[in-house]
Amino acid sequence: MIVFLVFSPEMYVGGVFIALILCMVLVLSSLIFFLQKFGIFVFYPSSFNVDKKRVLSFLKYMTVGGISSVFFGYIDTIMLGIFVASDFVGYYSAAFALIASVSFFLSFSVITLPAFTQLKKHQLKNAFNRVFRYMGILTLPMIFGSIAIGRYMIKLIYGYEYLPASVPFYFLSPLIFSISLTSILVSLFSAREEPRYFVKMLFVSAILNIILNYTSISIFAKISPMYAVIGVAIATLISRYFYMIALGVVAKKITKIEIRLFDLTKPVVASLVMFFILIKLMDYLQDINLFNGALIILSGMFVYFGVLFLIKGIEKQDIRLLKILKNKFYC
């Protein structure tokens, strides 16, 4: 926002890059500060008994995984840009950016990584089941809600010019679940010091994504650019879910955890009720602005959690846990 207030219109792009660099410098400085305070062994390893070979092996896989994740995240946009007009690339990028923002906002990896690191193997199963259940409770209504009001979200955030972005947005909405669960599984492998497994699966998934993207673009671009965008969205969805499922299968073999899909039944039921009510509300309002949009979202949340409570999708121990977290937060 400051960029648009300080710089002239012709300097907006350069100003955004300057702001991005400043933000990165600020984040890096903060990380160094906290490392010096809480991770002194990073700067003075000789004072601690550190297995350098073990640390370097872990960092090697984490570095490769980080680079591969960036490649995996942008390869669909790059390939789409080669074959279709920039307008349609912009529609896809806008839809994907919005979905990714919601997904990373609901990411549990920041919480699960330190928790999984401290738990013993026999404790992982119960901990993972609880995290998976809470993740389902939060991500599933976001998917159904995004599909219900996605068109209006696109218009409100990006403007009327980007309304075509709502088409790939609908297809990409299920990524909210896969990205969230994938982040939990990656943190699980990282906590067990087994990053090589998710790095290998990531590499395979990236190859699959390239093949599916090329195939879908080659076929659907002959019909229309929008069909090519839809094809890439479907290819991305398939490859991301392949990555998630592959990680789940490997995690079950390595850590003996189980992904209990029946835990998602009640959240799905509550999400469907919320979905149809949101559709009715949108038919009644016809249009959405910042004020009634906030009311619609709050109404959806009230309906979802109300239905979930009525069908006993939220247990007493969940409420007790929330009270404990609330007391710790306010203390």
Image: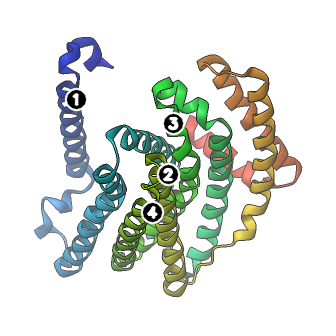
Q: Nearer the viewer, mark 4 or mark 1?
A: 4
Query: Which numbered disc flags the more N-terminal residue, 2 or 4?
Result: 4
The residue pinned by badge 3 equals 164
- Look at label 4 and name its amino acid: Ile
Residue 294, quarter of the rendered image: top right
Q: Nearer the viewer, mark 2 or mark 1?
A: 2
Label 2 to label 4: alpha-carbon separation: 9 Å
Asked whether the residues under the numbered discs 2 and 4 touch, taking CB atoms below 8 Å apart as contact, a structural biologist would say no
Asked whether the residues under the numbered discs 1 and 3 touch, taking CB atoms below 8 Å apart as contact, a structural biologist would say no
Q: In the image, which disc is placed on residue 219?
A: 4
Label 4 to label 1: alpha-carbon separation: 40 Å
Q: Secondary structure at mark 1?
A: helix
Residue 331 appears anywhere in the view:
no
Label 3 to label 2: alpha-carbon separation: 12 Å
User: Residue 4 at x, y = what percent?
Assistant: 28, 16
Q: Secondary structure at mark 3?
A: helix
Q: Residues within 10 Å of mark 2 (few under 14, many from 20)?
A: some
Q: Secondary structure at mark 4?
A: helix
Label 4 to label 3: alpha-carbon separation: 20 Å
The residue pinned by badge 1 equals 19
The residue pinned by badge 2 equals 227
Query: Which numbered disc flags the more N-terminal residue, 4 or 1?
Result: 1
Q: Split into 4 quadrants, where in the image is the C terminus?
A: top right
Query: Which numbered disc flags the more N-terminal residue, 2 or 1?
Result: 1
- Look at label 2 and name its amino acid: Tyr
Q: Residues within 10 Å of mark 3 (few under 14, many from 20)?
A: some
Find the residue positioned furthest to the bottom: 253
Q: Secondary structure at mark 2?
A: helix
Q: Name the residue rendered at 73%, 65% in the picture.
A: 263
Along the line of sight, which residue is nearer the eye, 71 or 134?
Answer: 71
Query: Which numbered disc flags the more N-terminal residue, 4 or 3?
Result: 3
